[in-house]
Amino acid sequence: MQDTDRIILASDAAGDVVVCAEGLSFWGGVDPGTGRVIDAHHPAHGQDLAGRVVLMPTSRGSCSGSGVLLQLALSGRAPAALVFHEAEEVLTLGALIAARMFDRPLAVLRLSAASYAALAREPAATIAGGRLRAGALDLPLAPVSPGDLALDEGDRARLAGASGRAVQLAQEVLGTMAAAQGAARLIDVTRGHIDGCILAHDANLIFAEAMAEMGARVAIPTTINAISVDRQGWRAQGVPPVFGDKASRLADAYVRMGVAPTFTCAPYQGVSVPARGEVIGWSESNAVIYANSVLGARTAKHPDYLDLFIAMTGRAPETGVYLDANRVAEVVIEVEAPLGADDALWPLLGWLAGRLAPDRVPLLRGLQGLKPGPDDLRAMCAAFGTTSASALLHVAGVTAEGDVPPRADAPVLRIGRAEIAAAWAEFNQGPATVDLVAIGSPHAALSELRAFDAALGGRASAPGVAAILTVGRDVLEGARAEGLLGRLEAAGVQVIPDLCWCSITEPVFPPGARTLMTNSGKYAHYAPGLSARAVRFGSIATCAEAAVTGRADPAPPAWLA
């Protein structure tokens, strides 16, 4: 823990203090138009952050939070200042882009635990002249500078402008972020994945087109996340041209910069699968956590926009889980899994593990005998990313580094039937009547499409119930080749590529739907804020049954009863 109070990004600021007792994901947790907290599961739900001095230990959740903060800055609804006491990257990067590219600065501070606690007791604060003042508190703030960062010959050349202004900007921002994270150097990465391509607000389009117009080009093989429309089918789906054209422009801007048009949030599904130990530069929280945990690759959870700068330079700050020491489990979670549990268990466990380890790497024990498959593990990783800022989790006897001993002083926590049942109840606050079944957050695998088809058993979705599965293009083609796509469509199921549930909008999201059911812990967490709909959650077979009957059993599954 640091004992120096630092100003990461300098700007004069003043405002009322808002204290978030736990980390907050701005993506899915803060309205990008107003600055109000919309995460229904967060203690600060309903708070207005615009113009406030906002304290939180660190951020959590999606890498896309940087884009939400940029949008708030561009519209004048950003916090006056962000104050952390742990390492933080996502919101810091958004603030840095707002200041460097668009002259919309806001202050970012990282305080010692004692100073943070003292500030949290004050009603208002002022930041000016390198000092923080609040009541009797008067703290000098040490600036952060990339001057001590070790640069190689390529770094220095890019910083001097040898590759043009776009690359120079990328190198400058990388240096500032590396310094803020305490990195000693930058390291080479072999591949990238871009996350800031969802048109949740105009900031992502403004940034991407500005970079493309500057001549930005990626320097390493780079894939791209799900976008906000079916790239080829959005017109036939009734998407308004004003939205569809913007979403297409956003995707096109990245393709012009040399990014492969994969349009999936699951780049590990045969599109771009890193090897164990490979050093990569990915964004998108579920992809990052899966790559580190299951594949044993190495990537920090890079925020939106920094992912492009990493892809442009092939360089990343050597911090976080790039380092051996930071991949060791810091907390042990003993799991007593109920007998007979179905696939709904894994997202529930991921969500609970994130709550128990909101800023630390956990090791889960007691699960080896359940033999989780890739779909189980990615469901766990995706849900874990909604409640934890960590880029990595371990499962003893299962994941790539699950047998590495934890730290000697790691506390031991427990998850049992009661905790799992409480999480199930948290995800099932909607009514029994279901209008929409939503599968594919992250993008559904071919195996999940097969499982959904098998659970339908030749039956069709009920009248008035939409069943929509979102997938990557490779999965769509695989389903078409084996006749699976035809069977699903005959059952009234839509299979849509390119977009996913965290980016879907009306009218592709059925406007009349009031309650959705999903097998995704990630979407069950974010959907109330993103869609303003009630939510039900269950296994893929339970979701298929809801599609056929239009109802979700209000009682917990038998294995939790």
Image: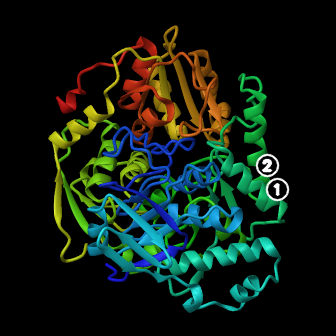
Mark 1 Cα within 10 Å, few/some/many (few <14, many 20+)? Answer: some
Which mark identifies residue 423? none
* Distance in Å between CA atoms under marks 2 and 1: 6 Å
Within the image, what quadrant is residue 534 found in?
Answer: top left
Q: In terms of secondary structure, where does tag 2 sit? A: helix
Within the image, what quadrant is residue 97 found in?
Answer: bottom right
Q: In terms of secondary structure, where does tag 1 sit? A: helix
- Relative side of 102 to 385, left or right: right
- For residue 497, say whether it is visible: yes
What residue appears at the point 61 percent right and 16 percent down from the top-left corner? 490
- Relative side of 536 to 26, left or right: left
What residue appears at the point 83 percent right and 65 percent down from the top-left corner? 214
Which residue in the rendered view is the most extreme toward the front? 135
Measuring from the top left, give residue 311's x and y in whole percent.
Answer: 68, 68
Residue type, numbered disc 1: Arg
Out of 425 and 297, give the one closest to the viewer: 425
Out of 217 and 207, give the one closest to the viewer: 207
What residue appears at the point 62 percent right and 20 percent down from the top-left corner? 489
Mark 2 Cα within 10 Å, few/some/many (few <14, many 20+)? Answer: some
Position of the C terminus by quadrant: top left
Which mark identifies residue 252? 2
Position of the N terminus by quadrant: bottom left
Residue bearing mark 1 = 256
Measuring from the top left, give residue 187's x and y in whole percent.
Answer: 58, 81
Out of 112 and 537, give the one closest to the viewer: 112
What residue appears at the point 31 percent right and 69 percent down from the top-left corner? 116
Q: Are marks 2 and 1 in contact (CB under 8 Å)?
A: yes
